[in-house]
Image: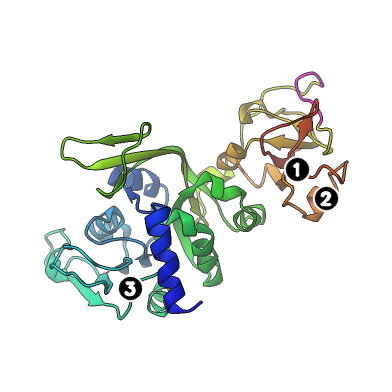
Amino acid sequence: MNKKDLNKNLHKAKVNKEDEFYTQLTDIEKELKYYKKHFKNKVVYCNCDDPRVSNFFHYFSYNFEKLGLKKLITTCYQNQDMDLFTKSDSKQAIYLEYSGDKNNNSIPDIQEIGVNYLKGDGDFRSEESIELLKQADIVVTNPPFSLFREYIAQLIEYDKKFLIIGNQNAATTKETFSLIKENKIWLGYKSGDMEFKVPSHYEARKTRYRQDETGQKWRSLGNICWYTNLDIAKRHEDLILYKPYNKKDYANYENYSAINVDKVADIPMDYDGVMGVPVTFLSKYNPNQFEILGQTHSGDISKEVESLRTDVKKKHRGIIDGKQKYARILVRNKRL
């Protein structure tokens, strides 16, 4: 893809998809507290972060010594407005480098932060940004939701550790789901509601929207989660199961050799066959307890799912009493 096309696509995403959602510092602190052991002597890269407002830059610069970081690098897409350090009307992007507190005041002072100009606009796919990515050990940011698949593919391509925010729906896309199934990525601790600052030009909405006393606009989303490939304790905790299986409560699909489970809490403790469980199961997934086989989705043509289909003409979601159920993840309990 040439540079013109890259800019066109990113501009379209930012304008039409409304991709600017600024993460609150409290949400970053609540999640990052579980990952501290991973950051010692590491280079952290936040490559979708406007330094004027980035709480990721704030978190890592103020906790630089506590985490034992080696270096912090941040970049953002373009730089059109007043930033933290200067006034600029240029579309030329900047990147910041911080290597820790030099004057022992425990504050990342402006003179301690290197402000550098990129030749281009800071698109995470640009050659300049990729060169910075290569320097990084761990990437932490909130990437554009509309470019999530492309973003995570780049992290995998360059073999980077990461902790990033995304929409839960992204977990069921073909590319991301394959990574989860292969245990190359997984969900972090927080899943569900999260509120974000949004730019002033975003239109008001009837729900999940507010404007605070300063005029700042906010939107909340109910299906947000963290994606990571950093090992966390939660990933090794068994889901507590207490319900016994019975044929009345757990109907078989008409088009899959599997039973339907409507709630994660209702997964039977003694069923050794294949179960269709809600997508929210992924936030509880322990690969030592369960095996993920696939999805009840026509796009899943993996050998595991194909072997479970009982009607080749009905490849869509699981059917019970002639009606399609919600999309389900097909799993098997490995403890039985």
* Residue 124 showing in the rendered view: no
Color encoding of the figure? rainbow
Please tell me whether residue 201 is drawn above or below residue 109 in the rendered image: above
Task: Classify mark 3: residues with Cα within 10 Å, few (<14), some (14-19) or many (20+).
Answer: many
Depth-wise, is mark 3 or mark 2 nearer the camera?
Answer: 3
Q: Which residue is mark 2?
A: 306
Q: Amino acid at mark 2?
A: Glu
Question: Residue at point 25% right, 67% down?
Answer: 79
Mark 1–mark 2 CB contact (< 8 Å): no
Span shown in magenta:
247-252
Q: Which residue is mark 1?
A: 316
Q: Give whichever of 269, 5 is nearer the camera.
A: 5
Sequence-wise first label, 1 or 2: 2
In 3D space, how far apart are the residues under numbered discs 3 and 1 (Cα atoms)?
A: 42 Å
Q: Give whichever of 70, 325 is nearer the camera.
A: 325
Q: Amino acid at mark 1?
A: His
Tag 2 secondary structure: helix
Depth-wise, is mark 1 or mark 2 nearer the camera?
Answer: 1
176 displayed left or right of 116: right
* Magenta span dominant secondary structure: loop
